Image (tube, rainbow, N blue to C red):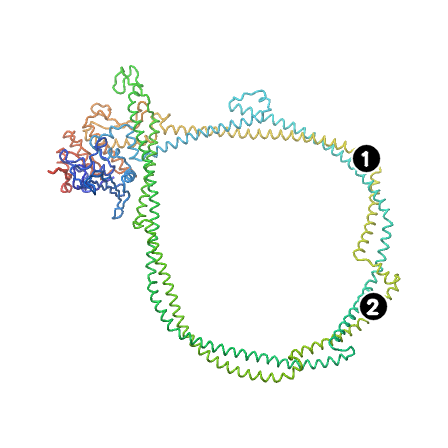
Amino acid sequence: MKLHRLELTGFGPFRDRQTVDFDAFERDGVFLISGRTGAGKSSILDGVSFALYGSVPRYDNGERRLRSDHCFLGDPTEVRLEFTVGDRRWRVTRAPDYERPAKRGDKLTTEPARAELDELVGDAWIGRAAKPREVALLLDEVLGLNAQQFQQVILLAQNKFSRFLLAKNDERQQLLRTLFGTRRFEQYKDDLEQRRRAAQRELEAAGDQTRTLLDLAEAAASDDAERADGAPASLDLAARREAVGRARQRADYRVEQTAELRQQADAAHARAVAAHAELVERARTLDDLTAARARLARLDDEAPQITELIRRVERARAAEALRATLEAAERAAEALAAARLAAADADAGWVEAGGDGADDLASVIDDLTGEIARCSDAAEREHDLSQASARAAALDETTSRLAAESSALDEQLAQVPAERERIDEELATTSAQGARVDDLRLRRDELRAQSAAARDAAVLDDEATAAEARYVEVSERAERAAATVTDLLRRRFAGRAGELASGLVAGEPCPVCGGTEHPHPAPAADDPVSDDDLAAAEADRDAALQSAREAGDRARRLRLDHAAAVARAGGRSADDVAALLEDADAALTTAHRAARRAGELAERRSALDELDAAVNTERERLLEALADAREQAAVVTATVTRLEEDLVAARGGYASVDERLAAATSRRSLAVTVRDARAVVAEHERGAAETRTDLDARVAASDFADVDEVRGALLPAAELAALEKRRSQYEADLAATRARLLELELAAAGVGDERPDLDASAAEVLRADTARAAAIAAHRDAVNAADRLGDLLDRIDAAFAAVAEQAEEAATVTRLADTVAGRAPNTRKMDLETFVLAAELEEIVAAANLRLRDMSSGRYTLHHSDALQARGAASGLSLEVLDAHTGRLRSPQSLSGGETFLASLALALGLAEVVTSRAGGIRLDTLFVDEGFGSLDPETLELAMRTLDELRSGGRTVGVISHVEGMKEQLAAQIVVEATREGPSIIRQDAHGADA
């Protein structure tokens, strides 16, 4: 951390703005802050502390007199500090609360405390926090030190200069943990403790699993003789495992016994089944023989019916040879009857049409054919007349239509000039309105963005309010947790005397006074505070602080996001932007409508011009078409007149030639039909006579007496096939039954006719099967029991191996966790973090001794001590002082004031050097020492100044506050604080001295 610039306004003894440029002393390395007593030298350090933490070292437990008493009521009070942490430059501005005149009336009002934190990004300062609480939270994260730690390593204020030297182990550990970032080692310890507990739980779980498997195995072997005789369940695991192994051996023996019994039962069952099968086969043979004899008798009874069936089939086959001739004669007779009926109908139609049955149909047909030819020619001319008449009517209609269209076009042409003028006027107006579309669209888009930002700002405002409430809540909880730790420390300190007294032994020296008599030992505290109590409270405090830091980060981010959203919204609310957006949308809609209307009007104007030209062209075309239509109408009218004269004779007595042609065609068709029907009747009469003669000849040559007997013998094909199939089946059944009967009689020849007792044999098979099933079940149960015990025994052995392995791992993890946590076998009772910090403290002491030897002329050196502390107090971070004159180690509290100053200064410089050398640590580039040099003799002061002068090569800057005259002579770079005659002090920075 490095300071650059400090501005003080209305603060402490300074009324007007005073500026301190620390960068001006960067080359010198050491500068002096001097001035008369009470002028305000320490107020410069107060301003630094107030800017960073909102508090000053001198007012921690008293009245906070931060505002200058020299300020008038309207004067401001403000402190501004620029500093760098890492590679980021910050500027914090802070003001305390103070009274000022009210804006209205003559009363006073309180100006609330305020704070702002900015970061330099490029060449511009960017705001990061704007409220005291937000600034404090962000600075905690940036600085990494609280106010107390800051005063121990950077701002070595009056009366607090030696705090780090004289601090207790716990307090020193908290500071070193922050400076070196060793909290992760505490996490390592916690992680190992969790692993230790987990290993113990896994070991217990493995043991429980082993006991569970043994319980299952013992339950499975509950019929074992040893278990049944009352083997104690309290045997150790190994003895119980041996008992389960013996039970497995007995189970294997039972498997062998049941296997032999099963083989015997299988053999008995096979013999019973074979005997029963033989008896069943004998009974089946006797039953089949009886059934075959009965079937043969039934077939003999059906023989007469089969003989009649055969005779009928033979008659049907003989009649089937005459079926085609019979059906041909019947079809000829039916066709003759149908032809005679059709001829009668044709004669009736001819008579009805005016003919005579004695007419010469051939002559009539010839005459009608000539008449039809003449009428067909006249019909064509009649059709031409019809088309010509229709053409004349169409031409008349076309002439009228063209004349009307020509008149309508003349009217349209008369309206075009007025419509063109109206469109031009409206087009000029709408074009001007439509030209604003792009501007209005940009305005609408801007308002939409502002509307979205306003809505985001409203949401973020609620979220920020909730986050700030959460921040207040967790901050209060953190304060309560810190107060609890403080209270426990006070109680621990109060009970320290009782703890020491409890360890006193008569005759042994007291660790405090060295006396061997203890007449009045302090009583023990009623509610002693243990290390675990303090550790738990500190853990709660750290967790609460972490929660407060996270809540502060969230609240800060939400406030920054809210401010950005308000800026994007232009400072308007969502309702205001919505009203403006509604007006913009309406204006844009109107402009869009006007633009579309302008486009429509332009298109209409072009269409109107095109229409004007097209109408003129169409008018000329209509006039030409009208003249042509009138000419064609005159020609068609003459043609109609000529055709009407030619067709008067061709119609005769009919209304039209088509009607006369239809009548002649119909009469000719009737004459042709009558002629054809008479010819068909003659043909069918000849065919019917021929087929009848052939049928009579074939019947006479057959075994049938007449045609009717033939018809009676005929059978349908399906019925004839069924009869033949029945005869074939009968003959096959008869042959098969006789062959089967012969076979069965031969098989039963040596058996006898008595049927065997199958029920008794079946009962014997059932008994053998029951015995076999019981043997199989017994063998299966024995095998299952042996397999289950074998499986459990394998799992038990695996569990034993796992327990052994888990026990070894748990022992290793437990030893490591106990060692890291400072428990046995750790003889120093020093946890891992303390061990790491002790190493860092050793380096700090080594760096401090390089300067302390010189400043004390070789008399004093600091020593790190890791000796065990009494009553379980934290060890490993103690400091002792070796006095070369006596050769003995002594407590830092035993040093005089000047000696304490030298040791504290050396330790502070050593701490700054070691911390700065650590990569990623907090770099301490600026240090302040407030007084203490007055307690040194001139020779020692010379040594101290020589040590400070050596810091120039380290790149650090050290500010020394002192009124010792000798220091003014040695330090050319100075800041002089002077009190003016009016009262307020001013700061004068000696630029010449700085350049010297």
Q: Which residue is label 2 attached to?
A: 691
User: Residue at point 51% right, 30% down?
Assistant: 798
**Does 390 sit above or below residue 96?**
below
User: Residue at point 58% right, 20% down?
Assistant: 229
**Label 2 environment density (alpha carbons within 10 Å; few <14, some 14–19, many ≥20):** some
User: Residue at point 82% right, 49% down?
Assistant: 732
**Label 1 environment density (alpha carbons within 10 Å; few <14, some 14–19, many ≥20):** some
Q: Which residue is label 1 attached to?
A: 755
Name, please, the residue furthest toward the left.
Answer: 981
In this figure, what is the number of numbered marks? 2
Checking the image for residue 222, the label placed there is: none
Q: In x, y percent, where is residue 150?
A: 25, 35
- Does dot 1 land on a helix, a strand or a loop? loop
| Occupied quadrant, residue 866 | top left
Q: Is residue 672 left or right of residue 921?
A: right
- Does dot 2 land on a helix, a strand or a loop? helix
| Occupied quadrant, residue 280 | top right
| Occupied quadrant, residue 223 | top right
Q: In x, y percent, where is residue 76?
A: 19, 41
> Is residue 942 shown to the viewer in this render?
yes
Q: In x, y percent, where is residue 40?
A: 16, 36
**Does 446 sit above or below residue 160?**
below
Query: Quarter holding the N terminus?
Result: top left
Amino acid type at image mark 2: Thr
Amino acid type at image mark 1: Arg
